[in-house]
Image: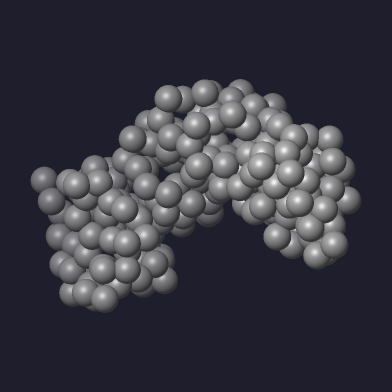
Amino acid sequence: MTTVVLAALRTRLRDLAEPAVRAQQTRVLGPAHDDELLGVRVPVLRGLARAHRRMALEDVDVLLHSRVHEERFTGLLVLAERVRTARGADRRALVGFYLARTGCVDNWDLVDGSAHVVLGPWLVDHPQDALGLLDGLAASPRLWDRRIAVVATLALIREGRFEPTLRMALSLRQDPEPLIHKALGWMLREIGRRDGPLLTAFLDEHRAELPRVTVRHATELLPPEVRARFVRTRSRERG
């Protein structure tokens, strides 16, 4: 049953839609044929999520199963708001709710807007369980589960814990999907932002094994002369 709160939110999303934004999103996201894009800007969605952070999980579930892209995104952002303030068993329950619905997280923007802020805090709180959970997601046949695993490590990176990301960069280096290669490069770049020598040492050891796009993204913030060394090396090795 659609609640009054949920119905009002859906109406508000349609009121905030912009045709120009919808056209841009269609080009950038390449949505599935049954995915409806309204054209609502992400900062607007974040504001709506903050305003609806007390929304019942039953309503969040309806949003996540909607074929309207912005409804799914808003549901994920509401979850992120709730995880941010939850602790203990409440946070565990919210993470379980998310993990049971990763099939609804079916585009790169939905992954990138949710993995590190919904799953990430739980990984930080439970380091003894983090690797097993990440390995399970990384082994999934679903592209988006694997990207969730990669992007969720951003929360660990921000805590100065780099090993899970480095480990995943090696375990997923032969993944067939460019979206995984790009996500790995993004996470490695975030490590380099905090510890350039560590990233440089990692690339010195493993650059021949990593996809070219991963190395290119990973080295974006390194000093130009250092970055050029890795990029030129990759160019020669791959032709």
Foreground residue, 171 or 178?
A: 178
In the figure, 209 relative to 17: above or below?
Answer: above
Image height of 120 relative to 8, above or below: above
Residue name at image x 50 percent, y 42 percent: 178
Residue 128: x, y in percent? Answer: 69, 27
- Residue 1 visible in rendering: yes
Residue 61 position in % (x across, y down)? 27, 43
**Nearer to the camera, 25 or 164:** 25
Q: Residue furthest left?
A: 1
Q: 67 left or right of 108? A: left
Q: Is residue 90 visible?
A: no
Please count the marks in the image.
0
At 79% from the left and 58% from the top, the residue drawn is 228
Q: Position of residue 32 (x, y in %)?
A: 25, 46
Q: Give the x, y percent position of residue 174.
A: 59, 29
Q: Quadrant of residue 77?
A: bottom left
Specify the quadrant of the image occupied by residue 54: bottom left
Residue sitting at x 74%, y 35%: 208
Q: Nearer the viewer, residue 185 or 133?
A: 185
Q: Which quarter of the rendered picture does the C terminus lie within?
A: top right
- Colour convention: one colour
Q: Residue at x 26, y 76 (%)?
A: 20
* Left or right, residue 61 beside residue 129: left
